[in-house]
Amino acid sequence: MSSDAAESYKKSKDSDAGSNNAHNNQSESQKPGDNAERNKSNKNSNESQGNCYCGKDRNLNIAELLCASCNRWFHESCIGYQLGKLVPFMTNYLFICKNCSPTGLETFKKNQAPFPQMCLTAIANLRQETVKDGSNRVLFSKDREIIPYIDQYWEAMTTMPRRVTQSWYATVQRALIKDIQVLFTYEEDANQGPMFGLYNMELTAIKPNYEAMIKQGQLKVTDMGIATSKLN
Ligand SMILES: [Zn+2]
Ligand SMILES: [Zn+2]
């Protein structure tokens, strides 16, 4: 793929995703006129909104879920619903918090994650581990780190049954290569072989694409807020 084609593909992906943080920051920086005014109002709205029931900041070291309705992040440990196994930086779920739910009960549903999503989640977690331990690496070995991560956390990452053969190793490789310069960065290391990182390094921007779910009819906007089309 030429870099122009990759760029326009990325742009169309970005607009599909509606708003990720990088995108927002970019459009904000394009209108520098009333910075002071906007910073002030951002600060106020952040203060009044907060995240989670506990009101504390995001914690990238634990699993957190984004509410489809109020767009706030909730810590796994603060959620009453039995979530099952999760890892941080998942995007294949729907969550509605207690405050937004007409019944006062949380809604949570995990979906199958396509391989590109699993790769993204794996690399984001590998990256965050190196932020935590101070080694601060951005590229990770496909064979020694990314595939073993997915293998270890398969059941947490997706509802797709675990594959019995290793043929999915090749699927991971294809997913990573297909989205170089879109989702992933790539470098060949003489010792470690193919290494991949995240194209958008902003880990806080990794979230479910609720806008697309609304378009596809998996979610509907009602007078009461956002609801799943089939509650179970
Ligand atoms: Zn909390
Ligand atoms: Zn909510």
Image (tube, rainbow, N blue to C red):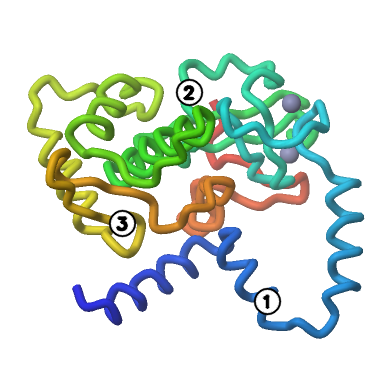
Q: Secondary structure at mark 3?
A: strand
Vertical side of 77 occupied by 198: above or below? below
Provide residue 137's location: percent of width, then percent of height.
40, 42
**What amino acid type is highlighted by mark number 1?**
Ser
Residue 92 visible at all: no
**What amino acid type is highlighted by mark number 2?**
Leu
Provide residue 161's location: percent of width, then percent of height.
25, 23
For label 3, the crowd category at 10 Å Cα-Cα, with few meaning under 14, some 14 to 19 and many 20 or more, is some
Which residue is drawn at the image coordinates 19% and 55% (left, top)? Answer: 177
Q: CA distance from mark 2 to mark 3?
A: 25 Å
Residue closest to the eye, 42 or 197 = 197
Q: Secondary structure at mark 1?
A: helix
Quadrant of the rendering where the N terminus is positioned? bottom left
Nearest to the eye among marks 2 and 3: give it.
Answer: 3
Asked if the residues shown at circle 3 and circle 1 are in contact, with their CB atoms under 8 angstroms apart, the answer is no
Provide residue 42's location: percent of width, then percent of height.
84, 60
Pick whichever of labels 3 and 1 is earlier in the sequence: 1
Mark 2, residue position: 86
Vertical side of 146 occupied by 79: above or below? above
Horizontal arrangement in the rendering, residue 55 relative to residue 189 (left or right)? right
**On residue 185, which mark appears?**
3
Q: Secondary structure at mark 2?
A: loop
Residue 62 visible at all: yes
Which residue is drawn at the image coordinates 74% and 45% (left, top)? Answer: 70
Residue closest to the eye, 225 or 64 = 64
Q: CA distance from mark 1 to mark 2?
A: 35 Å
Q: CA distance from mark 3 to mark 1?
A: 25 Å
For label 1, the crowd category at 10 Å Cα-Cα, with few meaning under 14, some 14 to 19 and many 20 or more, is few
Mark 1, residue position: 29
Which residue is drawn at the image coordinates 51% and 36% (left, top)? Answer: 131
**On residue 136, which mark appears?**
none
For label 2, the crowd category at 10 Å Cα-Cα, with few meaning under 14, some 14 to 19 and many 20 or more, is some
